[in-house]
Image (cartoon, rainbow, N blue to C red):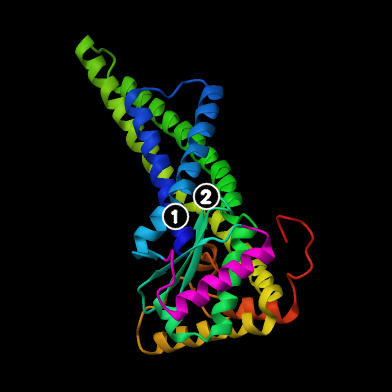
Amino acid sequence: MVRIVLFVITNLSVMILFGSILSLLGFWSSTTLELIRIAGIFGFGGAIISLFLSKFAALSAVNGVIINKASNDMESWLLKIINKQAHKLDIVAPQLAIYDSIDMNAFATGSRKNAALIAISSGLLKNMQQPSIEAVIAHEMNHIASGDMITMTLIQGVVNTFVIFISRSLAKLICHWTSFMQDQDNEQFDTNNNQHGDVNSSLTYVIVSTCLEILFGMFASVIVFWFSRHREFYADAGSAKLVGCRNMISALQELKRSHESKTSNGIIATLYINSVKKNSLISDLFASHPSIDERIEALQHGTYFNKSSYFFK
């Protein structure tokens, strides 16, 4: 969940910043074709910048420490497992980072599969059995090997393009309508009033377009979260192939027990775990992970084991 949320937030921030700067400088063209072209450039630009910042942003958010050389038996074992699984998946072994957290959590991020990073919480290492830890690592390794962050960037870029184009187009319509209504109320304007009106119109355009980008960007993130939920099932299946279905199911069951224990004690559960059971339709749309029960059921039925397509493998 950490990598998804940070990616979406960073991407949305970059996109809005670019759009606001362009608006203030007056670089948004009045022609539809140029607006589409600029929306595409900055839509994909925001997604690509977010991708390259993903490792730094994730490590900064959790205050993770990269382990270049093992200082204890656990770190040595983790590096060994990562190298072993990377060899099986035919990718360069990602960096390992450990961060301090009571939550049982792990995530993978990076701009490309041969320059990735896996971060694991101290809570997971302390409270989870080694076969389950290995399954969690295999799950994250499959995210890396499948290039999920790259695919997400392409999806986010397309989504951004539509968000920027629609937001700017609607903002222009609103500004034109506002100017038209003002003209109806005031039949005569001197030069100073015209200049003042232009300034007000530009400021209104910036404010309206920025608000619309935030609003549409939030709703558009539903597509990114759908992709994230979709890929979780395949990462689970990939982990099961690497370390055994029983180990992956055991890892999910341990996460489920941890979640239930924290919930019963009134402690907020980690975002990585998401919910044990399905929630309302709205909350499910904005969830980055399927429920644990759904993931366990998919593994038990082998639903995602035999897909041949790269995107759906």
Coordinates of residue 139 in the picture (x, y in percent): 60, 70
In the rendered image, the vertical position of residue 18 relative to residue 281, given as above or below: above
| Magenta highlight range | 67-91
Point out which mark residue 140 bears.
Answer: none
Looking at the image, is mark 1 or mark 2 earlier in the sequence?
Answer: 1
On the picture, is 74 further left or further right than 175?
A: right
Q: Kindly identify which residue carries mark 2.
A: 111
Point 52% across, 64% down: residue: 288
Residue 126, picture quadrant: bottom left
Q: Percent x, y for residue 185?
A: 29, 23
Mark 1 burial class by Cα count in 10 Å: few <14, some 14-19, many 20+: many
SS category of the residue bearing label 1: helix
| SS for callout 2 | loop
- Looking at the figure, which quarter contains the C terminus? bottom right
Q: Position of residue 171 (x, y in %)?
A: 42, 33
**In this orientation, does residue 17 appear?**
yes
- Identify whether 176 is placed above or below 69: above
Can residue 212 be seen in this snapshot? Answer: no
Q: Amino acid at mark 1?
A: Lys
Is 245 rendered above or below residue 20?
Answer: below
Image point (62%, 64%), residue name: 86
Q: Main secondary structure of the magenta part?
A: helix
How far apart marks 1 and 2 lie (CA) works out to 8 Å
Label 2, residues with CA under 10 Å away: few <14, some 14-19, many ≥20: many
Residue found farthest to the top: 191
- The stretch drawn in magenta includes residue 84: yes
Residue 137 sits inside the magenta stretch: no
Residue 144 appears at what percent x and percent y? 59, 59
Q: As shown in the figure, which amino acid type bears the numbered disc 2?
A: Ser
**Mark 1 highlights which residue?**
55
Q: CB under 8 Å between callouts 1 and 2?
A: yes
